[in-house]
Amino acid sequence: MSTEQNLRKGCHAYITGTHTSYGYVPSTAAGIVFCILFGLSTIIHLIQLGRSRIWWCSVFVIGGLAPFFFTAGVYIILGRLIQVFGRDCSILRPSLYLWIFCTCDVISLVVQAIGGGLASAAVNKVNGNTDPGTNTMVAGIVFQLASMSVFVALAIDFLIRSTRRGMLKSGKKSSIPILSAMTLSLLSIYLRSIYRTIELSQGWTGYLITHERYFIALEGAMMVIAVGVFNFIHPTTSLPPSSAEDTGEWLR
């Protein structure tokens, strides 16, 4: 079989005979498409950042590299919207969203990293048991899903309060596009988090983790939507003019 035919089938091991831990041969086409989409989105975010010079939006540029960084942007946007719509539209102060949920994300990331290290070390041992590492990773990702569920509930509460107070029908209409973009991005990230929790809880040989179509649809596609929507509806076009210093004030 020619090299061209091999590439059409999918990715292949750099070292012949190396076993893939995925349970399938990753799609070359899907990998290329997602690299292009995330790359373009990140470049556009970088251009938008340079034009606006609102430096907290740098989280969207960094977010093209990992979902952990991108969720910080969503937390900040909700805080900014609370400033626009009024403090009485939220249970928490605007600054608390970023500090509380970013802290939860960091804790989750550390726990998952520890679990990954334990599982990786066990794989390289004779009769090694990967269960402790896997269970630790699952605990980390379940914690992340739980904290995100709380954030989603608070975001829904904000929407309900804003609607009841007639904010969406008043002079706050200019904020509706960014509110819609935040909702779509948050929903995509949340669906991805649910998928990741179920996937890892099934183990390394589970159904979801060994079937690429679910990874493409519920991991890759969800994050493309979450990242890309802010290319079309950037915070600087819907939120009142602000600067990095203004944001710094409410983060304190």
Image: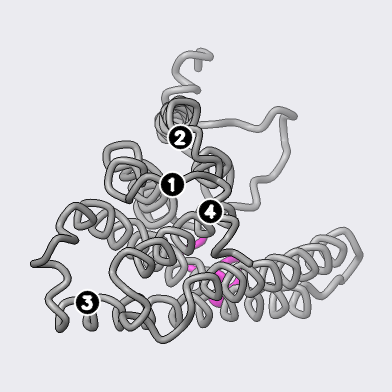
Q: Which residues are magenta?
A: 200-209
**Residue at 58%, 57% in the rendered image:** 68
User: Given this view, does label 4 or label 1 mark the residue nearer the observer?
Assistant: 1
User: Given this view, does label 4 or label 3 mark the residue nearer the observer?
Assistant: 3
Between 16 and 245, the residue placed more toward the observer is 245
Between 173 and 189, the residue placed more toward the observer is 173
**Residue at 85%, 67% in the rendered image:** 122
- Tell me which numbered mark, 4 or 3, is placed earlier along the sequence: 4
Mark 2 and mark 4: span between their CA atoms? 12 Å
Between 135 and 206, the residue placed more toward the observer is 135
| Numbered badge on residue 242 | 1
Look at mark 3 in the image and give the residue it sits on: 162
Mark 4 and mark 3: span between their CA atoms? 28 Å
Q: Which element type, helix, strand or loop, lies under badge 4?
A: helix
Between 207 and 32, the residue placed more toward the observer is 32
Q: Main secondary structure of the magenta part?
A: loop
User: Given this view, does label 1 or label 3 mark the residue nearer the observer?
Assistant: 1
Say which amino acid is labelled 2.
Answer: Phe
Mark 2 and mark 3: span between their CA atoms? 33 Å
Say which amino acid is labelled 1.
Answer: Ser
Q: Which element type, helix, strand or loop, lies under badge 3?
A: helix
Disc 2 packing (10 Å; few <14; some 14–19; many ≥20)? some
Look at mark 2 in the image and give the residue it sits on: 38
**27 shown above or below 215:** above
Mark 4 and mark 1: span between their CA atoms? 25 Å
User: Given this view, does label 1 or label 2 mark the residue nearer the observer?
Assistant: 1
Quadrant where the C terminus sits is bottom right
Look at mark 4 in the image and give the residue it sits on: 67
**Left or right: 54, with 179 as reference point:** right
